[in-house]
Amino acid sequence: MLANSKREKLNFPNLHGTLLDVNSPEHFIQAAYIMFASFCGASTVAIDNKIEQAMDLVKSHLMFAVREEVEVLKEQIKELIEKNSQLELENSILKAAATPETIAQLQNKPQPPSSTS
């Protein structure tokens, strides 16, 4: 009989009394740190605040980088759409000027695979 594929949700209390879902990588790191700090007897509140600030800083830098990349990709998509429209127009003009034999050759010729890069 197959085992249930759903992972059991594991919770761990953080320093603020709320439960962390330790299946989440971010919460797992926080939970591991809290356990380590409590075993070491360190000032967990101060260190926890610094870790939280560092995580917020990393998150904001990642979000900025993602937004920047999205803008670049949007511009590339816009340029590709414009280029595609121009090529479709050129193609229709060339097809209109081509002889029926030329069009028949193009339709019978196997098309090269399109690249996805």
Image (cartoon, rainbow, N blue to C red):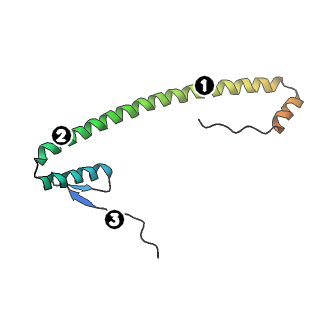
- Between circles 2 and 3, the one closer to the viewer is 2
Marks 2,3: beta carbons within 8 A: no
Q: Are marks 1 and 3 in contact (CB under 8 Å)?
A: no
Judged from this view, the residue extending furthest toward the bottom is 1
Q: Compare marks 1 and 3 and give the one earlier in the sequence.
A: 3
What residue sits 76% from the left and 23% below the top?
93
Q: Which numbered marker is on residue 63?
A: none
**Depth order, front residue of 67/110:** 110
> For the residue marked with disc 2, what is the amino acid?
Lys
Tag 2: Cα neighbours inside 10 Å, few (<14), some, or many (≥20)? few
- The amino acid type found where label 1 is placed reads Glu
For image coordinates 15% across by 43% down, the residue present is 47
**CA–CA distance in space, label 2 to label 3:** 30 Å
In the image, residue 27 sits, relative to residue 75, either above or below, namely below
- Residue at 45% x, 32% y: name it: 70
Residue on which the image places disc 2: 50
Q: Position of residue 46 (x, y in %)?
A: 12, 43
- Quarter of the figure with residue 49: top left
Q: Amino acid at mark 3?
A: Glu
Q: Quadrant of residue 112?
A: top right
Label 3: which residue? 8
Left or right placement of residue 34 versus residue 106 in this view: left
- Residue 8 in the image: x percent, y percent? 33, 65
